Image (tube, coloured by chain):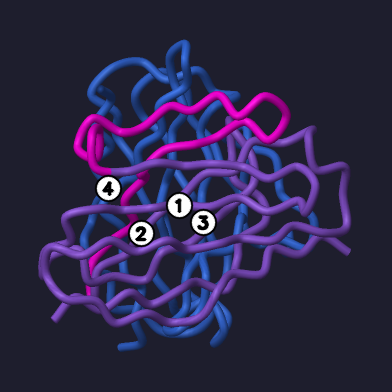
Amino acid sequence: QVQLVQSGAEVKKPGASVKVSCKASGYTFPTYSINWVRQAPGQGLEWMGWISADHGNTNYAQKFQGRVTMTVDTSTNTTYMELRSLRSDDTAVYYCTRGLAWLDYWGQGTLVTVS
Amino acid sequence: EIVLTQSPVTLSLSPGQRVTLSCRASQSVRSGDLAWYQQTPGQAPRLLIYGASKRAAGTPDRFSGSGTGTDFTLTISRLEPQDFAVYYCLQSDGSPRKLSFGGGTKVDMK
């Protein structure tokens, strides 16, 4: 079965960086892009960007341009999302999710706390 | 950038009632690129509807999606206790693709 398994919770100081991983299994990895979506406490869903799992092409939401980097390791079917210059309002659950026109499978989420 | 506006923000209803949720786009969205999600507390979102009207695997048939252009609707024919949740619409547009979510509608129990 399709699974996206994310790394564990992180606590970071303001100004630091965080790197969250997402390991995929149960499907042909290069076939689907991986998106990253975040959700601040009590708030809605916010799309951050996507990376193509075959060639590593990326497209980031304008809000995160210059502060986010998404990478892929095809040898381990793992994608990574690094967010830099963290602020308190980056405190959120970060999800990886598969797809491009719609997002069908989601990771369990990674809580990143900036404090 | 396409902005999605969902209404109402909150609905207070009873089990068995019919629910209609709205998602309005700031510009036309291709029907194939509109999806609906359900999220319960502490859980990741779950895909309910894709392509505006196609039920995802495992979505009960009491859920239906419709709409074209800038106006889309998610209908729950008869609310079940497990349907009390937050619902989001999602659109995907452009080349390269950019995605955006609506602000969500919370369906809670009266």
Amino acid type of the residue tagged 4 in the rendering: Gln
The image shows residue B91, relative to residue A29, as above or below, that is: above
- Looking at the image, residue A73 sits to the left or right of residue A7; the answer is right
Q: How many residues crowd mark 1 within 10 Å: few (<14), some (14–19), many (20+)? A: many
Q: Earlier in the sequence, mark 2 or mark 1?
A: 2
Comparing labels 4 and 1, the label whose residue is closer to the camera: 1
Colour displayed for chain B in the image of the structure:
blue
Q: CA distance from mark 3 to mark 4?
A: 12 Å
Mark 1 → mark 3, Cα distance in angstroms: 23 Å
**In this picture, is B88 found above or below A52?**
below
Q: Which residue is mark 4?
A: B6
Tags 2 and 3 in contact by the CB under 8 Å rule?
no
Under mark 1, the amino acid is Met
- The shade of chain A is purple
For label 2, the crowd category at 10 Å Cα-Cα, with few meaning under 14, some 14 to 19 and many 20 or more, is many
> Mark 1–mark 3 contact, CB under 8 Å?
no
- Chain letter, disc 2 residue: A
Q: Which quadrant of the view contains residue B61? A: bottom right
- Does B65 sit left or right of A5 as displayed? left
Residue corresponding to mark 2: A38
Residues in magenta?
Answer: A42-67
Query: Residue B101 at what x, y percent from top left?
Result: 35, 44
Give B76 or B93, whichever is nearer the viewer: B93
**Which residue is the site of mark 1?**
A81
| Residue position for label 3 | B37
Residue found 36% across the figure and 32% down from its top: A60
Q: Secondary structure at mark 1?
A: strand
- x and y percentages locating residue B35 in the rendered image: 53, 41
Are circles 4 and 1 on residues that touch, CB within 8 Å? Answer: no
Distance from Cα at disc 2 to Cα at disc 4: 19 Å
**Quadrant holding the N terminus of chain A:** bottom right
Q: Position of residue A99 (x, y in %)?
A: 64, 39
